[in-house]
Image (cartoon, helix red, strand yellow):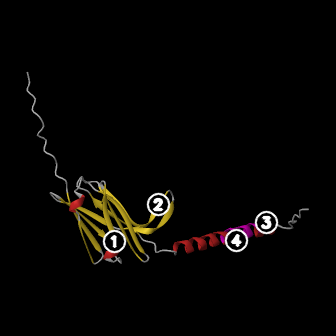
Amino acid sequence: MSYKKKRTSPFDLIDDFFKEIEDMFEEEFERMEKLSKDFTKSPLVYGFRMTIGPDGVPHIEEFGNVKRVGMKPKISEEREPLVDIFESDNLLTIVAELPGVEKDKIDVKVVDSKLIIRASNGDRKYYKEIELPKPVKPETAKAQYKNGVLEVKIELKEREKEEGHKIKIE
């Protein structure tokens, strides 16, 4: 048996409407409270920098542990450090900011055409895969770490000279 409430005045409709709104707010506050508990598991770090490349095109680079996946944020335990790449005649220098990590907790390696940086020290975790702009000699890589800044230097592979074979024209 269902019971239907008899409305005696238009104010009953308004009361019902405000009750629905109140219920919606309570549900939303509960959802936000649950979300905030999820966010407090690890610190939120987000930043970006904008640079102008040699071609005059602006480049935007994001860093931190908050990424966009569609319209929603995705929070990772590992932060993506801010990285700069400098290139000279025969040397590639990669500088990464890894504050709060001890030297022996950093792992750096070259795999194919990527430099992979992984560091972990308690609640500070960093991870970054850097696509190297030119081929390098991995065996020449040297790294230094001081005051939260990692500097990796790798020699570039020498370009093969295009001597080729001269063809006689008949």
Q: Does the CB distance between marks 1 and 4 fall below 8 Å?
A: no
Magenta: main secondary structure equals helix
Please state which amino acid type lies under the numbered disc 2. Answer: Arg
Q: Outermost residue toward the top?
A: 170
User: Which of the two discs, 2 and 4, labels the residue nearer the N terminus?
Assistant: 4
Q: Is residue 18 left or right of residue 80?
A: right
Which mark lies nearer to you, 2 or 3? 2
Residue at disc 2, secondary structure: strand
User: Which of the two discs, 1 and 3, labels the residue nearer the N terminus?
Assistant: 3
Which mark lies nearer to you, 1 or 4? 1
The quarter of the picture where residue 59 lies is bottom left
Q: Which residue is mark 4?
A: 22
Q: Which residue is mark 3?
A: 13
Q: Which residue is mark 1?
A: 106
Q: What residue span does the magenta drawing correspond to? A: 16-25
Please state which amino acid type lies under the numbered disc 4. Answer: Glu
Can residue 132 be found in the magenta stretch? no
Q: Is residue 14 left or right of residue 141?
A: right
**Gap between marks 2 and 1 measured at Cα:** 27 Å
User: Which of the two discs, 2 and 3, labels the residue nearer the N terminus?
Assistant: 3
Point out residue 47 in the picture as x, y percentages from the top left corner.
38, 68
Which mark lies nearer to you, 3 or 4? 4
Vertical order, 89 against 108 (above or below): above
Q: Which residue is mark 2?
A: 68
